[in-house]
Amino acid sequence: MSRTAEEEGKMHNSIRGLLAFLVVLMSLAGVGCTQNRVTEGPAPGVRVRDERAPYAQVRLNTVAILDESLAKWDDVKKYSKLAVESTNSERTATGTLRAWALLRNRTDYDINLECRVQFFNVDEEPLEGPTAWKRLYLPPNGVATYSESSVGTEAIHYYYIEIREAR
């Protein structure tokens, strides 16, 4: 059985159409796979640069209040539930570093907090991992001091204290 020229032409056109369809389909599949590979897995670290959050990076020798409910209280009075009155660090007799923060409850009711600290070496490199969360009770309109010492003596004078409401 031989095919006519017209039948051969139709068959070639069909094959060309099928090949074109397959090329388009494969390119779409390739784009989809490429996009999935880019977003798959952990995201790379990115420094926050936002004029609405100018202090988003870790600032050493400071306190970070992690819960917005503590940091923002009343839009009319413009003050928060918790005030950080002062912070500092000092060398202990054993050579470790003790960091502390004096905190003030600015409400008429008890506040239960959890605090932890991260110590850093001379190169501002984190040491030891953050300490365990430690509970701190603040009476109404009262003050309390959170303090914690490093385990080793490598901590210089850099620390970063985090505070959140007790869970």
Image (tube, grey):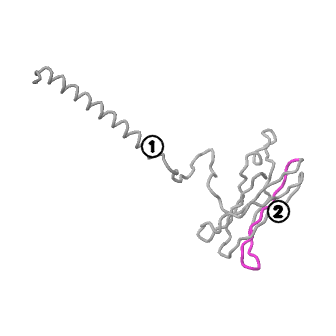
Q: Position of residue 101 (x, y in %)?
A: 78, 62
Query: Could you tell me how far apart the alpha carbons at marks 1 and 2 are, in whole angstroms?
Result: 49 Å
Cβ atoms under marks 1 and 2 closer than 8 Å: no
Residue positioned 80% across, 51% down in the render:
82
Q: Position of residue 63 (x, y in %)?
A: 72, 58
Q: Position of residue 121 (x, y in %)?
A: 62, 70
Q: Is 25 located above or below residue 83 in the figure? A: above
Q: Which residue is mark 2?
A: 145
The three-letter code of the residue at mark 1 reads Asn
The three-letter code of the residue at mark 2 reads Thr
Horizontal side, residue 105 vs residue 120: left or right: right
Q: Which residue is mark 1?
A: 36
Residue positioned 83% across, 55% down in the render:
104
Tell me the SS state at disc 2.
strand
- Dot 1 or dot 2, earlier in sequence: 1
Question: How many residues crowd around disc 1 within 10 Å: few (fewer than 14), some, or many (20 or more)?
Answer: few
| Range of residues picked out in magenta | 89-107
Horizontal side, residue 41 vs residue 29: left or right: right
Indicate yes or no whether the magenta region holds residue 104: yes
